[in-house]
Image (tube, grey):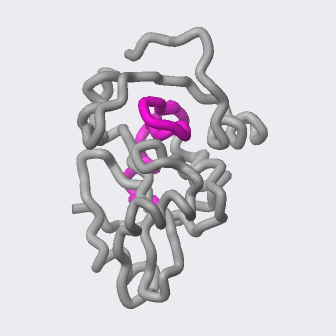
Amino acid sequence: MAKKTAHVSETPATQFLRRHGVSFTEHVYDYVEHGGTAESASRLGVPEHEVIKTLVMQDDRAQPLIVLMHGDKTVSTKNLARQIGVKSVEPCSPDVAQRHSGFLVGGTSPFGTRKAMPVWVEASVLALPRICINGGRRGFLVGLAPEVLTRLLGAKPVNCAL
């Protein structure tokens, strides 16, 4: 496990979680540009399957949405679009994603986003006992129960993992 630091700066994500009384653990690691979930899982000593990535995407009308996916999987945008009833889904460019979420790419959390967006979660994520997900800045994950995703974010389960 990552070493605990005496204090991790507050982020909009941790403020959101605290405001809603969510119990979570803080996991800090040295961020590596383009390291992704493989890097964070390795640094924290957790399976990459339990590290959940927060992806800001958009539909065919350029409406933003968030997809929460296992770190070791990718999103089938075709399957996702079909399941959520839109023509197509594609990742947002980094600057558009940042504008919607308020977070730097690599530090995007689904909690405390600048703009309210619909959240979709790979169904099998909800079956895990615990997940690690970005806490609102690069090199910072929070560990929590996956039910928080549906309870606080209204995340709807989908099956779009590849």
Residue drawn at x 54%, y 49% is 103
Residue 42 drawn at (x, y percent):
25, 26
Question: Could you tell whether 127 is left or right of 32 in the image?
Answer: right
Foreground residue among 52 and 33: 33
The quarter holding residue 58 reads bottom left
Which residues lie in the magenta part? 120-145
Q: Nearer the viewer, residue 91 or 122?
A: 91
Quick check: is 127 in the magenta stretch? yes
Give above or below for 42 relative to 64.
Answer: above
Residue at the image point whose x is 28% and y is 79% from the top: 78
- Residue 69 visible in image: yes
Q: Position of residue 97 (x, y in %)?
A: 47, 62
The quarter of the image holding the N terminus is top left
| Tally of numbered tags | 0
Q: Residue at x 36, y 30 (%)?
A: 31
Comparing 60 with 51, the one in front is 60
Instruction: Where is residue 50? Give x, y as percent.
Output: 35, 38
Image quarter in which the C terminus is found: bottom left
